[in-house]
Amino acid sequence: MKKAAAFLLSLMIVWTAAAAAAEKTYHLEIVSKGFQATYWQAVLKGARNEVSRLNAEAGYEMITMNFVGPDSEADITQQVQQFTSALNANPDAIGFAAVDQNAFKDLLNSTMSRGVPIIGFDSGVPGAPEGAVYANASTDNYAAGAAAAEGMWEKIIARIASSDAPVRIGEVNQDATGESVTRRGIGFIDRIMELAAEKGWKAAVTGNEYYVDSVTGEKAPEADAKIIIEVRVPAQPTVELCANEAFVLLNKADLIAVFGSNQVAAEGIVAADDNLFVCGTGDATVIAVGFDSGATLKAAIRLGILYGAVTQAPVDIGRVTIDLLFASAKGEPVEDTDTGCAFYTRENIDAEEIAQNLYD
Amino acid sequence: MENTMIKRKAARIAFIRSNTFQRLLLIAVLILLYAFFCAASPAFRRYTTLAYICNNMYYTLLLAIGVTFPIITGGTDLSMGTGLICYSLIGSYLMRMCGWPLWGAILATVLMGAAMGTVNGFGVAKLNIPPFIMTLGSMMFCRGMGSILTGGMSGTWPNYLEPGAGFRKIFRLVITADSGQRIPIPLGMVWMVLLAVIMTAVLNHTRTGRYIIGIGSGREALKLSGVNVVKWNMIAYIICGLFTGLAAVAYAGTFSNITPGEGAGFELNAIGAAIIGGTSMTGGSGSVFGAFLGVLLISLLQVGLPFIGLNANWQLLVTGCILMGAVTIDRLRKP
């Protein structure tokens, strides 16, 4: 009798353990840069879809996700609080896109000591302590900036070649601190300088000191340059202030092209042009190139106010982030994943490979 | 002889202490600043720059006209900036998700502002909550509410290609010259001047205005004379809320994409403009026209400083200095 009872008890323990193992759950915390650009809403959509897919595959709510972000990309303190709350929720892994590179070092050390894997996404967590970030799911922003330069170059090369006087190319960046925007801005300038050098043209870089100092190519003095690249950064990352900077650029008679390195900066260019009407796709107009999408930018491209823009794959960033978080939470090895980008214009805005990454 | 000199001196002191002096000083600063930017940058002299300044200041102008009223009562309204974004986000949500017509969304946006003004007014006037605390609370409330109701999503009002985009013409017309050149007409300035004239008349020539000024200069005396101070104090906040709602529509007409994180800080520009324009932070005196001039000055700096190669950090610094100067003048000219 005792043997039978012991056998039954063992069976129950094994069954309970097996059931528990079969229904293991994972809690993922994601701290983004906020929802101020529709780009982030597309990332959220990709993450939600992937969680739903994995849960449907498992047949139960295997993964729970909490996706948060500060009210603006300037709210460093709010993001620190959100990261602290995320850590206190005892997650199995944390997805993180830092708004400031220096504010999180202590928190990241603390996360590492608790053995919680961090997966960087979008701009990730540059300068993080060794071993804290397991992998990144992001666009190669430097390459994305270069893609914008190449897309623009095709349209302006003839005009530069035929001009006797130096020409100006503007760049509006919403800040000089965020990793993604700065890498894009520098990638754009470096590529323009490479393309100019291939033609034997000298290029000068003026404006915001951070960008001017970060350029890797050889800068010519402004007086000797065939191309002057002028970089402008507002005090705060808002459309209104980006528009003011873009307005000054668009008023310059020698300006032939301008690049806005994210949705906010590109919308600023569109708002500034709303009173000047100098942007367009013609030979005598300013060729404006944006980044990401959104209802305003898509309309501006269709109308020919913007010549084109570079789109990342935000939905894919959300999806890949969840995959990497899930794998790292299970203890599987993970590695950096480039989620890609593409240049689009009015001609290919509706093509399937582009349209799936555009959002309102 | 001596008496005449004393009288003249007294008249001079009275003039220096008057609101008219501060406004004249402000007009002089505006003219000098405009002349300076024109001299420093040929591009600044263009008509399009003037049109750009006008077309981008409507929402700040409406906020400044509105907030002049609570400031005159000795209060303030910190909820305007986040409120503006909250109302325009919800207005866009009603249009996009609930199928409301454009006019319905515009009306709802304005009424939401008035409703929040009523809540602020009730808290300040009836419950005696300090205005700073009450409106700080509603500022946070609006910041959260807009994001919660729209699920943290951005909102869009009709942009260039969409039906209903014509509502942008309320603020900005574009005419095409024979040469094919497009010229922006800042039509919104007509409505702004009209509203400023109406609200100046309300402040200076109606019972509402007299009582609002009275609350700021001598609340107890007004109460003792049988005036319903709670009611008139509430009205000051309702006016402010109503103008915040109008500012939300103006903002949506200028920047059709509304993002939840924006707005914080708009109220500081508006309050700063009202103070620069001669409205006393301690209440009892103020001017809608002065607030109008204050917004002109801030907008001129915001657009002008980048033209001379100074970035927006300098704009904040210079605006801060002007604000401190205005408050100092306000203190000095009072006996």
Image: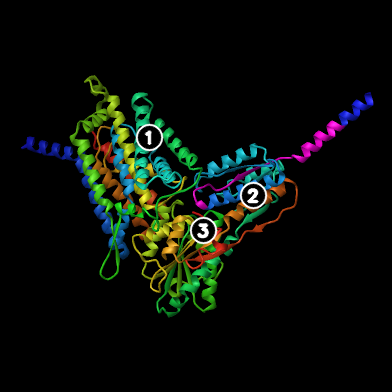
Determine contact: label 3, label 2, CB under 8 Å.
no
Question: Is A57 located above or below residue B36 in the figure?
Answer: above
**Letter of the chain that mark 1 sits on in the rendering:** B
Work out which quarter of the rendered image holds the N terminus of chain A and state it.
Answer: top right
Element type where label 1 sits in the image: helix
Work out whether residue A14 can be spotted.
Answer: yes
Q: Which mark is residue A50?
A: 2
Q: Which mark is residue B324?
A: none
Calculate the distance from the C-alpha at mark 1 to the C-alpha at mark 3.
Answer: 35 Å
Question: Is B229 located above or below residue B56 in the figure?
Answer: above
- Let me know if residue A28 is in the magenta part: yes
Residue B306 vs residue B63, the one in the foreground: B63
**Letter of the chain that mark 3 sits on in the rendering:** A
Residue B265 vs residue A94, the one in the foreground: A94
Quarter-wise, where is residue B90 in the image? top left
Residue A250 vs residue A219, the one in the foreground: A250
Residue A220 coordinates in the image, percent (x, y): 49, 72
Q: State the residue at coordinates (48%, 60%).
A: A209
Element type where label 3 sits in the image: loop
The label nearer to you, 3 versus 2, is 2
Residue on which the image places disc 3: A292
Work out whether residue B281 can be spotted.
Answer: no
Q: Residues within 10 Å of mark 3 (few under 14, many from 20)?
A: many
Q: State the residue at coordinates (41%, 78%).
A: A163
Calculate the distance from the C-alpha at mark 3 to the C-alpha at mark 2.
Answer: 22 Å
Calculate the distance from the C-alpha at mark 2 to the C-alpha at mark 1.
Answer: 40 Å
Q: Is residue B254 left or right of residue A262?
A: left
Q: Magenta segment range? A: A11-38
Mark 3 belongs to which amino acid? Answer: Asp
Residue on which the image places disc 1: B116
Mark 2 belongs to which amino acid? Answer: Glu
